[in-house]
Image (cartoon, grey):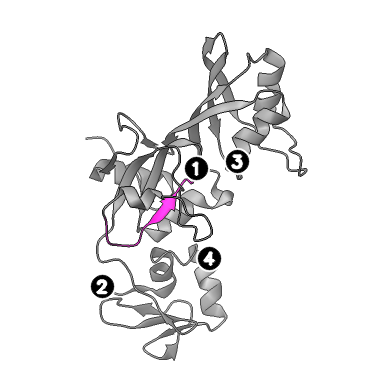
Amino acid sequence: MAKERVQKLLAAAGIGSRRACEALIEAGRVKVNGQVVHLGDKADPEKDTIVLDGKVIRLPKQKIYIALNKPKGYLSDIDETHPKPTVFDLVDIPEPLFSVGRLDLDSEGLILLTNDGELANRLTHPRYRHEKEYEVFVIKQPDEEQLAIWRRGVVLEDGYRTLPAKVEVIKRANNGAWLRIIMREGKKRQIRKTGARIGLPVGQIKRVRIGTLKLGSLRSGEWRYLTPAEIQRLRAYAGLEKEEEPS
């Protein structure tokens, strides 16, 4: 493997954004082969030993990208204080993976699992405001005023004002309605809190898209590897590489 800038290698290992990794280097917390590195220094992760705060940093030998349809009752990440099964129990992969696009215990739908730390950071960090699309069932018929308020943004109980969102009715039912909601943020239980705040209690949440990646026909609990084209589009969407021109 050719030498790369150390901040890029740290980001690829999931330490943080490149800017955050540059700050770690500037603070003198990163060493290569026992020597403190400086911005611009390069390393070969296959030959050199990269250490952050005394801990050896290892890069994955092969990048893994998995789309999973999370069922209800599964945690999106490991939580030792919460003895529930996690999405990692559904995927028989020995390598450690990042969970991109977390969902609460009672929600379902698309989650991306990957060891591409740089992509995981880009898709989860709030500053990038990448789109996520949900199908949401509210157990009350929404009126136009409620939908308009949701679209503009709602002040939650803690004082946080949600960003504007795209909200439309997919289908109405006697006991409520299915909504399509497209957001560029993802505070904890935000959809449920927003619905409750404007008088539209949420019954079901299913995420169907993260950026360019769609859930498609995956059944609950099923997973699959992303195709090379999907990986390229997702990394281009996240600003990590240029999108290929159609042939």
Q: Which residue is mark 3?
A: 189
Based on the picture, tell me whether residue 118 belongs to the magenta stretch. no
Callout 3 touching callout 2 (CB < 8 Å): no
Name the N-terminal-most of marks 3 and 4: 4
Name the N-terminal-most of marks 1 and 2: 2
Q: Which mark is residue 225?
A: none
Residues in magenta, as a range = 93-103
Q: Which mark is residue 2?
A: 2
Q: Is residue 232 visible?
A: no
Q: Secondary structure at mark 2?
A: loop
Q: Secondary structure at mark 1?
A: loop
Name the N-terminal-most of marks 2 and 4: 2
Q: Which residue is mark 1?
A: 103
Give the number of the mark in front: 1 or 2. 1
Callout 2 touching callout 4 (CB < 8 Å): no
Return the x and y of residue 184 as percentages of the image width and height: 56, 39
Q: CA distance from mark 3 to mark 2?
A: 43 Å
Q: Which residue is mark 4?
A: 19
Identify which residue is drawn at 38% across, 64% down.
12
Q: Nearer the viewer, residue 192 or 126?
A: 192
**Amino acid of disc 3:** Arg
Q: Is residue 174 above or below residue 190?
A: above
Quadrant including the N terminus: bottom left
